[in-house]
Every structure is written in structure tokens, then in C-alpha cells.
Image (tube, coloured by chain):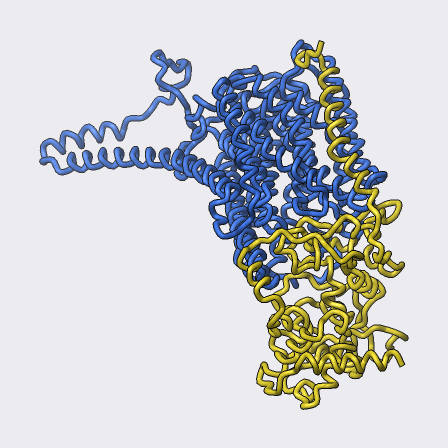
Chain colours: A blue, B yellow
Amino acid sequence: MKNCKIIILLFLMAIPNLMSAQEKITTENWLSSSGIIGTFILIAIVMIVAIIILFIKLNGYIDTMKRRQLDKNRMAFDDELVAMDGGDIDAILEKRKAALTYKLKGNELSGNHTAIDEKGLIQRVEKDPNNAFFDEKKKTSLSLETPQELKKIVIYYIGAAAFWLVLGTLIGQYLGMKFLWPEMDHQAWLSFGRLRPVHTNMVFWGWSSLAMIGLGYFVIARTSNNKIYNYNWAWTGWALINATVLLGSLCLMAGINNGGGEYREYIWPVMLMFAIGLILTFYNFYKTVATRKISEIYISNWFILASLIWTIVLAIIGYLPFYQDGLGETVIQGYYMHQGVGMWFMTFTLGLVYYYLPSALNKPIYSYSLGVLAFWTQMLFYTMIGTHHFVFSPLPWWLQTIAIVFSAGMVIPVVAGTTNFLMTMKGSWSHISKSYVLPFFLVGTIFYFVGSMQGSVQAFRFTNFVWHFTDFNVAHSHMTMYGIIAFFLWACIYAILPKLTGREPAQVFVGAHFWLAFIGLFAYMMSLMAGGTYKGLSWIDGDPFIESVILMKPYWVWRAVGGSLMFVSHLVFAYNFYYMIKGYTRKPSATQKVEEITV
Amino acid sequence: MLNFHKDHKNLVLTAGGVFIALSILIAIMPAFQMQETQPIPDEQPLTAHEREGLNVYVAENCMACHTQQVRNIEMDNVWGDRPSIPSDYFYSKKRMDFWRQSPSTLGSERTGPDLTNIGKRQPSEDWHLLHLYNPRAVVPESVMPSYPWLFREVDSAFMPKDAKVVAVPKEYFNKPGKKIIASYDALRLVDYLKYLKQTDMPSGDIDDFIPALKKIQAERTEGGGQSLDGAKLYSQVCAACHQDTGQGIVGAFPSLVGSAIVNDENTETLIKIVIQGYNARTDYGVMPPFGDQLTDAEIAAILTHERSSWGNDSEAVTEEDVAKVRQYVEMELNK
């Protein structure tokens, strides 16, 4: 704790230096600018963690190889036996003959005798050990006692989310290919301009939001030791949000667009349904927490309740018309698009992680007070930084400066959150190779640090100079909405669904999902970051604009490759989801004993 | 009193209240303040047609790839003569209708060029229509989508009255007896694009761009307009239609290579076309006038480049030649 505070203080002291370093803008030594170096370091962190995970996995594989080598040695020993002289061989053959005619009675290991393991040698009984390619993970045998209604709500929310994820990223993938083949189709409703907001809004409000709320229902009920206040409202919310995404997408494809401001392309009657859905959800959560059976409000509920109320306020401010003429609209746009990410997705997901991460590790969160610090600083700092999307724009310079200063201040909640999660995982690192849930949490945590910090340094004036308007922004938004939010959500889903339904997904497929998504994301963001940087430098050098289009082409190819891997991973995820929920109602797990287990 | 750990009401009220207070401070108040902006004296409001064009622009979500803000940094000086200021958006950024809000034209990504000054940079309606019908017909490397649904294919025999025929080169449309005509929406969209021009500041003094590269700046101050680069000017102003190779696009924009007018010993017609525009040949698009946009020296530099490139080998055009023709043209106009 004390160490953390010191680190945070040091960061704060360093901020003014970082800021003042931005005054003189020259590209001569752009590589040594603090923002660029910061980004390099942050990306290196992801690389290193990926390599560590890979090494842990490789180590497991090498162990298996070693075991095989031992087996081989034993075979060599057998060969030696064969090379022995006639008399000995005859004797052995006699024995062998007797052994061949020996028959088991069939009750040696079972029958009337109970298996005895006095010395506790048996650690794991594996019924199907013939999986030659992958390391076996521990299985979750915990089955949580959950009301059938709540189970159904969680499953339906996640199910709808999975559907929008697959459809939304299919559209994203299609859009990515349009950069390479702009003549792919000639349908108005499939054109790039119309489809781009369909993709972003679908994965925002369809996938992430529905998955978050579904997982949130479980957290709220569980940590309040209470039943959900009103199940019907949960269903109404589900229907409203799904209807929002469906109608909103159709409107956009038909060319009915609110004004093209990012993430508020749905016209207000459509978005109103989403807002009502959120208000219902908030009231439902609030009432459940208010009638909780324990005195403390768990930190997860702070984040979840606050994110709902913040987002309701945000949607209202974003759509009210009174102050949105001229550049008033632009001020609100910066505020809205940034808070949509920060106050809704990030805050809610952090709340989920504060519950699911400790519960997956079966230990308490490292520091409750760090969580509280992260909560209040999230509110204070995140709210102020929307205008960093409009640096150098005609918006007031002071507004831009506030946004940049508070972007740097985001170090505090981010470092607090990251420290908390990593310290909670500390001591359980060995579980990473044994669990299929933890790698998702670890990658989410690392991206939480890297993606958020990269966003902060990108707000600096120099980095903005190079990267603003380029594909670098697209890389950043995927690094955060995908690397942080989607990975955390998958971690939570894989952590909770098997416990609710009693059915585990095939580990091979969870592994395939993880690696396809991770490698895909890495290819996606690295190519766009590199391409975006070259694009920005080409603009600074005053090259003709079309040069920057031509130079992006190879990077767009790699983006499409990365995007394809990500999309395939979502198909695998959808299959895993289907497998986990298939026939879950037939096995009423309420009768099973509740056990404690480490996953 | 404020025990957030146990008192859910306080927790939610505080989180909500502080957030609302901060939001008013950082978003609503500045937004109201920005709304107070007045237009620049010479700024033109959108006509009904141009406003309809803006609606098409929003429906097709052009702002996904095109920005409309000239930032106050030097690399943006190719997109406008001065950095954008809040007044520039006075007329265009108003609530569209009951259902749709004020359009977010500033944009956040520049996959395509900035459009703040596109009406000045590219005043030709024919170029815009062909570019919308198929961007690759005029810019081969473009990744912009085509918008064929803004155009109609009609039989030449049953051409509607006052239809605007788009001169599409054969490679992109080749059906005997058929023509491509622009739809109402396409024409309105082009009206809007042509409206997009930076208004001159009344006093003439403008905010400077924050310089990016000392190198470029030094060149600017040293060069000081002494020797204009005709090739560069040509590629900025003319190449969109006549292409960098000078060969134009068959069926849309005439070739300058070996052209009788371009290589004529008497440069009067050539200079006149550039100053006044040209609309005498039905087999090609209309050439817009550039007299207001280019100085005499710039026109001379461009024409000298044209007359000495791609195999053309004619004498240079001087600033005086251009000045003479300009005087003559103005006299004719005032008659």
C-alpha cells in the first residue's frame, strides 16, 4: 500500500515535466519524444507478458516431452532383456505365458471394495488422458447455488451478447477488407460509411453492454446475499437493449444517422430505449443492494451502480439539444465519446473484475482501499478528459489543456487498479498454467495498464501531432475495448458459466479462443500503430495526401489478417458458450453440494 | 455521516451528484459558451440545396473518413489558408431536424482528405460527380467507396429533360446506348461540397499555424514566392482531373499531351481557359474558372510546366502574358 502511494506520488511529480516537454514541436527526433517512448515501453510490456505466458506453456510441454523420454528409456531397458541368453529367456517366457492366461476377476479395483488411498497419493483422476497436444487444465467442480430465474437471466444476457459479438465483428471484418477491396459491393446499405457505426455501436451496446449487465446481475445478487429485486425488469431491460441495437443498426443501414458523432449515431427515439433499459437495470440493482442481507456494500457494487447512473446522465447530456449548435456539439461529442468508454464500459467492467478475479482465485482482493481510491479518481479524472479527442481543433485551448493534464492524471486510477489486480494474482502465478480463466484476466489487466497509459500519452500535444486522425486511433480503441473490456468479459464468462450450468467447455477450444483472439489483436494493433505513425510522419513532411493512403496498404492487409483471427476466435467462443449452456436446465444444480475450489 | 461502505443512498447520490457537477463544468457550460459564437461577416449561409446535400453527407456518414477542421499546426496548411475557428461552423452545424442533431462534421479520422476547403480546391461539378460514381476513375489509388446508388443508368433515347449526364470513361461504364445520370441527391451532395470554402477574415490577419518542421519554414521564408514550382502547383490544382501524366481521362477530362491549344504559339486561348473556365466540348466535362484562385505568376508557372512536360515542347509563359489576358478578360466582362 505504502509503496503504491509513493509510486503514485512520483508519477504525479513527473507529470509537469512530461507536460512541459511538449512545448517545442519538431519531428527531428520524434523517436525520443516522451509520448512515443512511453508507448514503446507500454507495448513492450504486452510483448513480455505474452512471452512469459508462452514460456510457461512451453515449459509444461517440455515437461511432457521429458516424461516421454523417460518412457523411451524404459523401453530400451526392455530391449536389453530381449538380448539375454536362452535359459533366462525361457524362464521369462514361462512367466509371460502364465501372465497371458491370467484373467482379472473384474472386481480388483471396485466391486465391494472401496478404493483406499491412505497416503493421499492420488491427486487427480483423469478419465481421458489421451490428449496429446495440450496441457490439461484443472476443472471447475464448483456448482453455485443460484436461483433458476437468475441463471436464466445471466445466460440470456450473455447469449444475446455473444450473438452481437459474432455479428458485430463479422461486420468489422468486412469493413477491414473494404480498405483492400473498395469495390467489394455496390449496395448502399453495405457501404463503408453506413456500416462503420453499425459495427462500433453493435459491439458497444450489443456485445459489451449486454454481457456486462448479465454478469452484473450475478455479482449484485451474490455480493448482496440477496435475490434480484425484480426479475421481470431484467427481462424488459434485455428486450429494450436488444431492440435498440437491432433498430439502430437497421436505421443506420437505411441512412438514418443522428449526425455522425461517434457512438451516438443512433437517433434519439432508438437510444431512448437503451436509456430506459439502463434506468430499469439501475433501479433493479439499486433495490437489490438496498435490501442486501449484509451491512457492507462490496466494492464491485460501487463501480456497477455508479457506472449505471453515470451512463444514464451521459446519455441524457449527449442527446439533449439545447447546447449543441455550432461547436457546442463538438464539446459534447468529446465528452460523450470518451465518457461512454470510461464511465460505462471501463467502470462497469472494473466492478465485475473486483468480484470475479478474487472469486476465481478463491482469495480476497489485495486492497479494498486501493479499490476505493481507484473509484473516486476514476470519477474525478475520467470525466474531465473528453476534449483530448480534439487537440489542436478550434475548441478553446484551455479546454484542451485541462483534458491533457487530467489524461496524465489517469495514471492514478489505472496504477491503483492494475496494482490491485496483480497483487491479488501474486502468489497464484502457478495457476496460470493450470487455469483457462486466469490468462484472460492477466491479459485484461496488462491491457488495462498498457491501453489506458497509452491513451494518456497519446493525449500529449506532440503525440497528438503525429497520431491524431491516423489509423493509430483505431489501434488504440481496439487495444482498449477489445484488449481490456472483451478479455475481462470473457474471463468472467468462463469463470462463472460452468459453475452455473455444470458444463465445462472443452479446454482445447478455450485455449484456441484465447490464442486466436490474443494473436489477432496483437497483429491488428501493431500493424495499425506502425502504419499510423508512418502516415502521421508523411503528413508532417508535407507529402501529397494520396501517398499516405498508398503507404497504409500493407498495414491494412495485416489488420485484416489480425481481424480474421479475432473473428474466428469469436466463433470458437460462441461454440464454447453453446456447449456450456446446452441442456443446463436438465441438471438442477441446486441439489449439488456447494464446494470450495480454486480454479 | 458519509459512510459509503454501508450507506447505499449516500454512495449513489454522491457519485451521481459529483459527476453531474463535473459534467456541467467541463461539458455543458463550455458547450453553451461555444454556442454563442457569431458568424464571420462574409460567411454565407447554406442554401436549401446545400442543406439537402449536407443531409446526404450525414446519411452516408462521410465523416467516418473525412474531417472538416484545419488544425492550427503546420501540416494542416494544405487543407486551408488558416486554422479553422468556431465561427466557421455557425451555419452548417445546426440541428438538422426533429429526429437528428447538429452534424458532427469535424470528424475524428482522416482516412480521406480534409474537406474544409474542398469547394475551393476542387470547384468542378463534373469531377465531383465522376469521383462519387467511381473514385478510382480519377484517383487510381483511392480506397473510397463508389456511390452508384446516387446515380441512374438511362437509355440515351429516353433521356429525362435537364438530366445531368456524367462523363464516365469506357473502362468504368460501357453499355451501348446507355448513359449515367446524376440523381437529385448526388447533385445536392456536390452542391454542399462546393459550398465548403473557408471564408476570408475581414481584417485579413489570421492566426498562424504552429510550425512543424524548421526546414520547411526556412524554405518558405527564403523562397518567398520568387520561383514558383509549376509541377507542384499543377499536381495540387490540375492533376485531379488532368492527372499527373497530363493524359486526362478519356471521356471526362481532355489530355494535355500534344494538345493543340496547350502547345499553340499564341497562348491567349490557353490562358483564357484557365482564367475563365471552358465549356465548349460536349464530349468532356466542364472546366471551372481558376482566375480568382490563382495569381498571374502561378498560372504562368503551371502553364510553363504543361507546355514543357510529357513530350510537350513549347515556349514558356510569362507572368506578363497572363496579366495581359486577364486585363482583356476583365475588360470584356465590364463591357
In-front residue for pair B132/A533: A533
Task: List x then y, in percent, for residue A410.
Answer: 59, 31
B150 to the left or right of A571: right
Q: In terms of image quadrants, where is residue B313?
A: bottom right
Residue at x-position 58% and y-position 39%: A455
Q: Is residue A570 visible?
A: no
Q: Is residue A567 visible?
A: yes
Task: List x then y, in percent, for residue B5.
Answer: 66, 13
Q: In terms of image quadrants, where is residue A328?
A: top right
In-front residue for pair A87/A352: A352
Q: How many marks?
A: 0
Residue at x-position 78% and y-position 25%: A232
Residue at x-position 90% and y-position 75%: B161
> Would you place residue A339 above or below residue A187 in this image?
above
Q: In terms of image quadrants, where is residue B80?
A: bottom right
> Would you place residue B267 above or below residue A591 in this image?
below
From this viewpoint, which residue is outermost toward the bottom? B265
B78 to the left or right of A37: right
In-front residue for pair B75/B335: B335
Task: List x then y, in percent, for residue A77.
Answer: 18, 34
In-front residue for pair B294/A596: B294
> Would you place residue B12 above or below residue B162 in this image?
above
Residue at x-position 81% and y-position 40%: A270
Task: List x then y, in percent, for residue B282.
Answer: 79, 82
